[in-house]
């Protein structure tokens, strides 16, 4: 099964969070699991806030890119289209809200789960949560909009 990000063309594969061509980035991979989207990510030692705990900015970044990828996949579903079909649907963040609920320990694979709240022709709203085991460490709310033409390389 291909991840949402595996459908991104080269022009859209440099994002720090989800771009497969960004050797310094997270390179997350997101999949559908029923009605939820799922990403798994193991923080690196340099994602430390204080010894033993993950930096909150990483959690925000994971929620952001997980949610925009989910927005794209949800939009394809909304239009009853395959993710490989044209025209390409890509989303950018219009709004990102993150609530930090519990310290996030290092050394544990994180699971990010997203739920589509709303999808329209121009935007998608996604709620995501980051979990370390059974503990919900952060929740995010993302309003993602279709990428403006001005950002698309011609």
Image (tube, grey):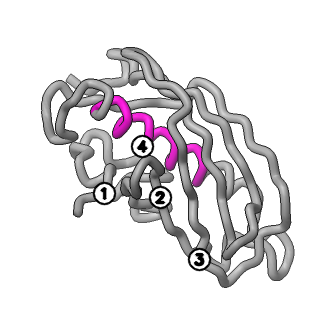
Numbered disc 3: secondary structure: loop
The earlier-in-sequence mark between 2 and 1 is: 1
The quadrant of the image that shows the C terminus is top left
Mark 3 sits on what residue?
Answer: 109
Please say whether residue 19 is one of the residues in the magenta stretch.
no
Numbered disc 4: secondary structure: helix
Residue 121 against residue 136 in the figure, above or below:
above
Q: Main secondary structure of the magenta part?
A: helix
Q: Marks 3 and 4, how far apart in space?
A: 20 Å
Q: Marks 3 and 2, how far apart in space?
A: 13 Å
Residue 6 against residue 47 in the figure, above or below:
above
Q: Marks 2 and 1, how far apart in space?
A: 10 Å
Residue 72 against residue 14 in the figure, above or below:
above
Span colored in magenta: 62-76
Spot occupied by residue 103 in the image (x, y as percentages of width and height): 84, 67
Numbered disc 1: secondary structure: loop
The residue depicted at 53 percent of the width and 69 percent of the height is 41
> Residue 136 lies in what quarter of the image?
bottom right
Spot occupied by residue 99 in the image (x, y as percentages of width and height): 80, 46
Mark 1 sits on what residue?
Answer: 3
The residue depicted at 47 percent of the width and 50 percent of the height is 36
Mark 2 sits on what residue?
Answer: 38
Q: Marks 1 and 3, how far apart in space?
A: 18 Å
Q: Nearer the viewer, residue 131 or 22?
A: 131
Q: Nearer the viewer, mark 3 or mark 2?
A: 2
Question: Badge 4: few (under 14), some or many (20 or more) residues near its Cα, within 10 Å?
Answer: many
Mark 4 sits on what residue?
Answer: 69
Question: Badge 3: few (under 14), some or many (20 or more) residues near its Cα, within 10 Å?
Answer: some
Asked if the residues shown at circle 4 and circle 2 are in contact, with their CB atoms under 8 angstroms apart, the answer is no
The earlier-in-sequence mark between 3 and 2 is: 2
């Amino acid at each position: 099964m291909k991840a949402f990000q595996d459908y991104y063309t080269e022009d859209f594969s440099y994002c720090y969070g989800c771009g497969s061509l960004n050797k310094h980035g997270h390179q997350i991979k997101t999949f559908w699991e029923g009605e939820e989207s799922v990403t798994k990510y193991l923080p690196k030692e340099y994602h430390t806030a204080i010894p033993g705990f993950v930096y909150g900015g990483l959690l925000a970044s994971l929620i952001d890119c997980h949610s925009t990828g989910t927005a794209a996949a949800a939009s394809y579903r909304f239009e009853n289209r395959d993710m490989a079909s044209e025209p390409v649907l890509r989303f950018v963040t219009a709004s990102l809200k993150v609530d930090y609920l519990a310290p996030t320990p290092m050394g544990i694979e994180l699971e990010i789960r997203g739920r589509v709240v709303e999808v329209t022709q121009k935007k998608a709203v996604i709620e995501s949560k980051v979990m370390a085991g059974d503990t919900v460490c952060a929740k995010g709310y993302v309003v993602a909009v279709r990428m403006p033409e001005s950002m698309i390389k011609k």
